[in-house]
Image: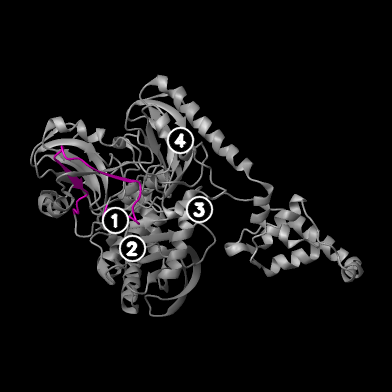
Amino acid sequence: MALSRLRHPLLSRSLRILSSSTRSLSRTCNSTIFSAGAHANIRPTSCSGITRIYDRSLKSKWTDVKCFSSSDISHEVLGMPALSPTMTQGNIAKWRKKEGEKIEVGDILCEIETDKATLEFESLEEGFLAKILVPEGSKDVPVGQPIAITVEDEKDIQNVPASVGGGIEETKPAQQDVTDEGKPESTSTMINASELPPHLLVEMPALSPTMNQGNIVKWRKQEGDKIEVGDILCDIETDKATLEFETLEEGYLAKILALEGSKEVAVGHPIAITVEDASDIEAIKNSVSSSSTKQQKAPQHDTKSEVKAQKNKITRISPAAKLLIAEYGLDASTLNATGHYGTLLKGDVLSEIKSGKLSPKAASSKEKVTSSQSHQQVAASKSDLEQSDAYEDFPNSQIRKVIAKRLLESKQNTPHLYLSSDVILDPLLSLRKDLKEQYDVKVSVNDIIIKVVATALKNVPEANAYWNVEKGEIILNDSIDISIAVATDKGLMTPIIKNADQKTISAISSEVKELAAKARDGKLKPQEFQGGTFSISNLGMFPVDKFCAIINPPQACILAVGRGNKVVEPVIGDDGVEKPSIATKLSLTLSADHRVFEGKVGGAFLSALQSNFSDIRRLLL
């Protein structure tokens, strides 16, 4: 949740120019746009789910939008500005102005985190900040989306929120129509907002730019507890780490909708309800409970004929399912098909066999003759089914799921080029020993390798680049930021050593230890693991001689480091005679994006690496 507070002096002064076009597009005269959730009584000022835009041409893409007219309010809708040429979305880091405050030309309304830095958004007109549509901490707000409403006259402030009243027609994205039985149901869809006292619906926040769902690890507050601004409501496991979710308003936690341990809760999905008055807690609980009971009882009124009709909708039977039906003598019309387009799958037949509720079809005379012969086969298949049950589901963390998805996309979409080279490790080991004995500086082999790689990238800047998919061209990185792979209980994390070429070996060592500890504890901040221009994966502590790593997009390369092995090398002595000598060799394998790396660039980079390893002490200069 912690965001970078870096400011770019040139960009922050140019906000008036960059945001003028966006402001002019979002300015209206007699109409106001509000974005709200599915319930009319929910205050949008603190709801992280208010991230929608209304546009007649985009009705099919944006939902949960309320548009209304007001002839007596002169106002202006502020859209998310484009504060950099490549910016398509931004994060609201902090609101400098609060609702109801007077604003002058040049006042800082809020701090916006872009794809480059955190910049200040200045007001171009004077007036009053009537409504904040996107609360502080909101992530991935598209450029042009309304974030606030201003009015010219202070008396119009009270009229703006009053116009939100009335029913809001609830529309849901198409992808939410498909329910997953494995996911916990949310009681928020069962709530009738008109029957509830004033309340606030707390939604699953987007705690990282790539987060689209999260897991509720632990609720810090319980139903009925008093909450203050800044209190930790719950711990949420994202695709990167486990982060704390802070409350933005004071009140009472009336109802928890997503229970502790809930998995894959979509961003924007309701997880709790808060109220301002403690006396409203019971009303919220009773209303939610009664609505939940009605929803649970409704399916019981389905007739048996309807259930049977659903089961009989079989358009196709898979080959494996046909074999099982023949072996067990089942009636296919009594089975329930769960495959696409009414396809009866092998799993459907197995589930019915395990349930024991089967209606075997009438056996013909021919089947009776062969029944004794197939009896042994059926018994064998039953034993196979029993053996197939001897497994254990290993639940994946959110981090592991994202890693699996990204690595698959990398292998499918990135043309990998593999280059290998062996380097002599003895000069590095000698330097490490001298640093410890002479200066009492303890560094690891990996710390020195990071410095060696950073120096090589500085010598060959073409290797410090990535492929821009949208432009279809190579982009050179301005800084050398090394991502290091750290194994944790929840998955592989890649904390970043920024500007590694400018840091000493001891500074790199201290930073690596600090970031690795944070990664294992799940306490990395977003800016500590997002980004990076080059990755290093070191398995030298294991009996791994060499391996090929998978590129971590959008980076263009990753260096795989194996273990050092002692080998016999021919060495020419002072007398000019070649003699056998023992040396420690280290195998390096570079996985590179072939769109960025050609053989010439890859060869130049590996040559720079070998040169740095052979003359390791020049890194101290």
- What amino acid is labelled 2 in the image? Val
- Give the Cα separation between the discs numbered 4 and 1: 53 Å
Task: Based on the picture, tell me whether residue 74 belongs to the magenta stretch.
Answer: yes
Report which quarter residue 345 is drawn in.
bottom right
The range drawn in magenta is 55-83
Q: Disc 1 or disc 3, which is closer to the eye?
A: 3
The reply to whether callout 2 and callout 4 are in contact (CB within 8 Å) is no
What label sits on residue 500 in the rendered view? Answer: 1
Mark 3 neighbour density, 10 Å: few (under 14) some (14–19) many (20 or more)? few
- As rendered, which of 177 and 356 lies closer to the eye? 177
Mark 4, other Cα within 10 Å: few <14 / some 14–19 / many ≥20: some
Measure the C-alpha gap from mark 1 to mark 2.
Answer: 9 Å
Disc on the earlier residue, 1 or 3:
3
Residue 462 placement, left or right of 9: right
Amino acid identity at mark 3: Val
Of labels 2 and 4, earlier in sequence is 4
Between the residue at mark 4 and the residue at mark 3, the CA separation in whole angstroms equals 20 Å
Residue 254, image x and y in percent? 44, 27
Query: Residue 302 appears at what percent x and percent y?
Result: 63, 45
Disc 3 marks which residue? 178
Q: Point out which mark residue 453 bears.
A: 2
Question: Are the two marked residues, 1 and 2, in contact with CB atoms closer than 8 angstroms?
Answer: yes
Please rate how many residues cluster around mark 2, counting C-alpha atoms within 10 Å: few if below 14, some from 14 to 19, many from 20: many
Query: Which residue position holds label 4?
Result: 191
